[in-house]
Image: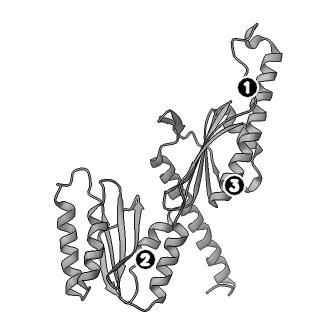
């Protein structure tokens, strides 16, 4: 098996811990969530929106040192469907987060604790995800944390060579069909092992499997029950980016939102049932 891997470390847990520490420190925090410019926004739109929020914060007592610490973070947002959340305290930036796919409004607050609810609402609709695009002889795995940041990018070629369709006698010879099917199954077994390790490493709650329909069915059939339960195998579109077959990020984000909503619904239903029996508050 030949593997090429690049990883990007996730700082999600560290960022959550920073939010916790800001709540615990009993020190006023300046919080800003600023949407990125939309495609049709004039160039000065972002600066004008930040200037208005800045004045509001100053009027409510936010120290100038905090506002200066936030300036650089919020004014560097590129265009797109996201927002920048910045928290500052004692004149220093404490945390900066890009909220991919954010659909809320601009918000700002100066208070004894961080204005973290919009960030928590946003994160509640995100789930760590592994995407596996599989063919008969190769696979491409990508893992994302709950913020959408990449954790793993791995391209794999299976040990078992695919049998050529133009073999002597073509597919009319059953032995060639059997050899090809056996090759695909053995590669699928290898791909399943990679998927299992990626899901465990990312603590993924969603697995998107796409690619060749036959190989997808072989891989899914080989998954343990726990992984099959979180697998999405709809006919997800596959596109080529930099020579690699991938599921578009917008499709992955939508699948993550669907999975998060389903999980939340199940949790609420479980709470209602337990509350009805005096087992939840």
Q: Quadrant of the N terminus?
A: top right
Residue 19 spot, x, y in % from top left: 47, 78
Q: Which residue is mark 3?
A: 229
Please tell me whether mark 3 or mark 1 is closer to you in this view: 1
Q: Nearer the viewer, residue 264 or 179?
A: 179
Residue lying at 55% horizontally and 70% vertically, measured from the top left = 13
Label 3 sits on a secondary structure element that is helix
Is there a contact, CB below 8 Å, between mark 2 and mark 1? no
- Disc 3 and disc 1 in contact, CB within 8 angstroms: no
Badge 1 is on which residue?
161
Query: Residue at the spot x=40%, y=82% of the render?
Result: 114
Any mark on residue 117, and which? 2
Q: CA distance from mark 3 to mark 1?
A: 30 Å
Mark 1 secondary-structure assignment: loop
Label 3 vs label 2, nearer the camera: 2
Cα distance between the residues tagged 3 and 2: 30 Å
Measure how far apart labels 2 and 1 are at the Cα level: 52 Å
**Secondary structure beneath label 2:** helix
Q: Is residue 183 left or right of residue 63?
A: right
Please tell me whether residue 239 is drawn above or below residue 99 in the rendered image.
Answer: above
Which circle's residue, 3 or 1, is located before the other in the chain?
1
- Up/down of 261 relative to 273, above or below: above
Q: Who comes first in sequence, dot 2 or dot 1?
A: 2
Query: Camera-side residue: 272 or 122?
Result: 122
Q: Residue at x 50, y 64 (%)?
A: 125
Quarter of the rendering containing residue 270 = bottom right
The answer to whether residue 204 shows anywhere in this view is no
């Amino acid at each position: 098996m030949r593997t090429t891997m690049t990883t990007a470390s996730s700082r999600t847990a560290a960022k959550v811990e920073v939010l916790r520490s800001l709540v615990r420190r009993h020190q006023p925090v300046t919080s800003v969530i600023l949407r990125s410019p939309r495609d049709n926004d004039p160039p000065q739109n972002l600066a004008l929106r930040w200037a208005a929020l800045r004045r509001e914060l100053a009027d409510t007592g936010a120290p100038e040192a905090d506002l200066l610490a936030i300036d650089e973070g919020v004014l560097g947002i590129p265009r797109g469907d996201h927002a920048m959340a910045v928290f500052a305290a004692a004149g220093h930036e404490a945390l900066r987060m890009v909220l991919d796919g954010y659909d809320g409004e601009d918000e700002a607050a100066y208070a004894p604790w961080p204005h973290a609810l919009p960030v928590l609402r946003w994160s509640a609709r995100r789930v760590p995800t592994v995407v596996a695009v599989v063919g008969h002889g190769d696979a491409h795995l990508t893992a994302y944390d709950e913020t959408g940041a990449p954790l793993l990018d791995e391209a794999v070629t299976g040990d078992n060579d695919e049998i050529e369709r133009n073999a002597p006698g073509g597919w009319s010879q059953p032995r060639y069909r059997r050899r090809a099917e056996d090759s695909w199954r053995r590669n699928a077994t290898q791909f399943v092992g990679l998927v299992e390790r990626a899901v465990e490493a990312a603590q993924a709650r969603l697995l998107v499997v796409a690619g060749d329909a036959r190989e997808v069915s072989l891989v899914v059939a080989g998954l343990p029950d726990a992984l099959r339960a979180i697998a999405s195998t709809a006919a997800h579109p596959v596109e080529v980016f930099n020579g690699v077959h991938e599921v578009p990020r917008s499709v992955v984000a939508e699948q993550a939102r669907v999975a998060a909503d389903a999980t939340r619904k199940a949790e609420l239903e479980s709470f209602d049932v337990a509350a009805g029996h005096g087992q939840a508050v």
